[in-house]
Amino acid sequence: MTFLVLSRNAPYIMVETNGYTLKRNQVFPDRLSAGWMIYLPFVINPSLLPMADEILPIANDKEQLGTLIISKKGIFDGENQDDIDKANDVEIQLLNLGLLPLITEV
C-alpha cells in the first residue's frame, strides 16, 4: 500500500468488489466510497471508526502519510448486504468526521 501511495499523484485509493459502487451500494453517490478498503491522506485515530475491522497507518520513513481503512477483514462481497452495511457505516462516520471527500474534490 505504501508503494501505491508514494507512486500515485492522487492521494486516494479505493478497493471494492462485485460492483459495489457501480451498483450504487454506497451511501453518498457524490463522494468517495469505502467499499472493502479506502486509503485517505489523513491521520485517523482508530477509535473514531469502531465499525471498521482494521485501521492501518501508512507511513514513509519519516512520517505517517495517511490511513488505510478496512471495512471487513477477509473477502468483501459487494453483493452481500452485511458487507454493504458495514461499508455504509464506515462512509457515514467518515462523512460525520468531515473526512469523506466529494468526487469532484479528488
Image (cartoon, rainbow, N blue to C red):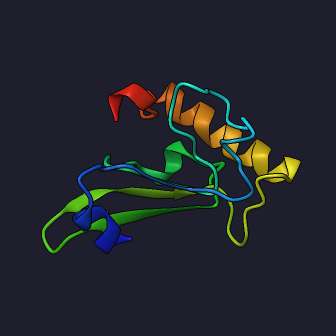
Q: For the point 57% across and 41% down, which residue is it?
A: 33
The residue drawn where x is 42% and y is 49% is 45
* Residue most extreme to the left: 62
Q: Residue at x 23, y 65 (%)?
A: 6
In the drawing, does residue 71 fall left or right of residue 18? left
Q: Residue sitting at 87 percent across and 47 percent down?
A: 81
Q: Residue 87 at what x, y percent from top left?
A: 68, 46
Residue 98 visible: no
Q: Quadrant of residue 22?
A: top right
Using the image as rendered, state which of residue 38 and residue 66 is in the foreground.
38
Q: Is 83 drawn above or below residue 54 in the view shown?
A: above
Of the 4 image quadrants, the one containing the C terminus is: top left
Side of 65 relative to 36 (left or right): left
Compared with 83, 90 (above or below) is above
Q: Quick one: 62 or 21, which is closer to the camera?
A: 21
Is residue 7 visible in the rendered structure shown here? yes
Q: Which image quarter is the N terminus in?
A: bottom left
Counting from the top left corner in percent of width and height, residue 24 is at 72, 35
37 with respect to 25 (left or right)? left
Report the label total: 0
